[in-house]
Image (cartoon, helix red, strand yellow):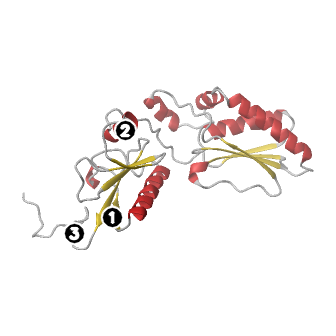
């Protein structure tokens, strides 16, 4: 019978573990804490494939300024809660963005300290084996990173904390054509489902505000017509009889391009 349950998870998966039955619950949100990615993007991508249970990542997380205070505070609060729980178990929920690195490392460290204090502890990592997501460092050869991070010229229609809506430099395929792109570098819509969903959310908000009828299009790979490898969604306004063909429309003989 466990008297302390510690559950780590990734908040961005929107799949938090449920509270344990009759447990008093504490929570630690690391989403904006202990953010200390390696400076080298190549090293960061290697770390992304590891987890907080790998010794190198664990030690890196626990060595980040502020980690020791978070662990000490959690141990103190769990100990106090156990003392007044009247025999009920206590539960600690620890989350970071994806549940692979910071949350598991911190959860294991707290669990070890509680065991040393005489508690019977069960530590569960709910999202540690989810697919790794590459770090989103700006890329020096990316024209959209140049806009979002370096202030390169662009006609910005709307800016959110995480996303930009801009007018294509070419003017687009029709009046009102917009591009919606994340500020973080994400190659395409398959790289990070949460970022992809956020971009579509922003596009939907903007299209609803502007009114009218729209296509929302995004691509993954050269064969799918992607030319800039930084996730972006095309918001294309449509009207009856505008003669715009969708990218996957097969040309008929009259529309077939000259060879």
Circle 3 packing at 10 Å, graded few (<14), some (14-19), many (20+), is few
Residue at image location 72% in from the left, 34% down from the top: 70
Circle 2 packing at 10 Å, graded few (<14), some (14-19), many (20+), is many
- Real-space Cα distance between discs 3 and 1? 13 Å
Q: Is residue 163 above or below residue 111?
A: below
Q: Earlier in the sequence, mark 3 or mark 2?
A: 2
Report the front residue among 228 and 120.
228
Q: Which residue is mark 1?
A: 215
Residue at image location 45% in from the left, 27% down from the top: 40
**Quadrant hosting residue 122:** top right
The spot of residue 95 in percent (x, y) is 65, 45
Q: Earlier in the sequence, mark 3 or mark 1?
A: 1
Asked whether, in this view, residue 161 is left or right of residue 96, the answer is left
Which mark identifies residue 130? Answer: none
Element on which disc 2 rests: helix
Q: Is residue 80 above or below residue 65?
A: below
The spot of residue 189 in percent (x, y) is 40, 52
3 vs 2, front mark: 3
Q: Which residue is mark 3?
A: 242
Q: Earlier in the sequence, mark 1 or mark 2?
A: 2
Q: Which residue is mark 2?
A: 145
Marks 2 and 3: in contact by CB < 8 Å? no
């Amino acid at each position: 019978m466990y008297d302390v349950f510690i559950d780590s998870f990734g908040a961005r998966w929107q799949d938090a573990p449920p509270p344990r039955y009759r447990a008093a619950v504490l929570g630690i949100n690391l989403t904006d804490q202990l953010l200390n990615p390696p400076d080298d993007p190549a090293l960061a991508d290697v770390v992304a494939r590891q987890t907080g249970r790998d010794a190198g990542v664990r030690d890196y997380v626990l060595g980040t300024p502020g980690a020791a205070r978070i662990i000490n505070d959690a141990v103190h609060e769990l100990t106090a809660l156990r003392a007044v729980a009247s025999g009920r178990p206590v539960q600690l929920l620890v989350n970071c963005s994806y549940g692979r690195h910071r949350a598991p490392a911190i959860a294991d460290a707290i669990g070890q300290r509680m065991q040393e204090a005489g508690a019977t502890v069960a530590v569960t990592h709910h999202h540690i084996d989810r697919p790794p997501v590459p770090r989103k460092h700006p890329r020096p050869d990316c024209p959209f990173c140049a806009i979002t991070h370096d202030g390169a010229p662009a006609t910005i229609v709307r800016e959110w904390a995480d996303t930009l809506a801009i007018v294509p430099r070419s003017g687009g395929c029709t009046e009102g054509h917009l591009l919606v792109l994340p500020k973080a570098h994400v190659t395409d819509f398959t790289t990070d489902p949460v970022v992809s969903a956020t971009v579509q959310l922003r596009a939907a908000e903007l299209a609803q505000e502007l009114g009218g009828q729209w296509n929302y299009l995004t691509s993954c790979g050269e064969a799918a017509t992607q030319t800039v490898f930084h996730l972006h969604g095309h918001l294309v306004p449509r009207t009856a009889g505008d003669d715009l063909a969708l990218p996957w429309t097969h040309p008929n003989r009259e529309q077939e391009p000259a060879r």
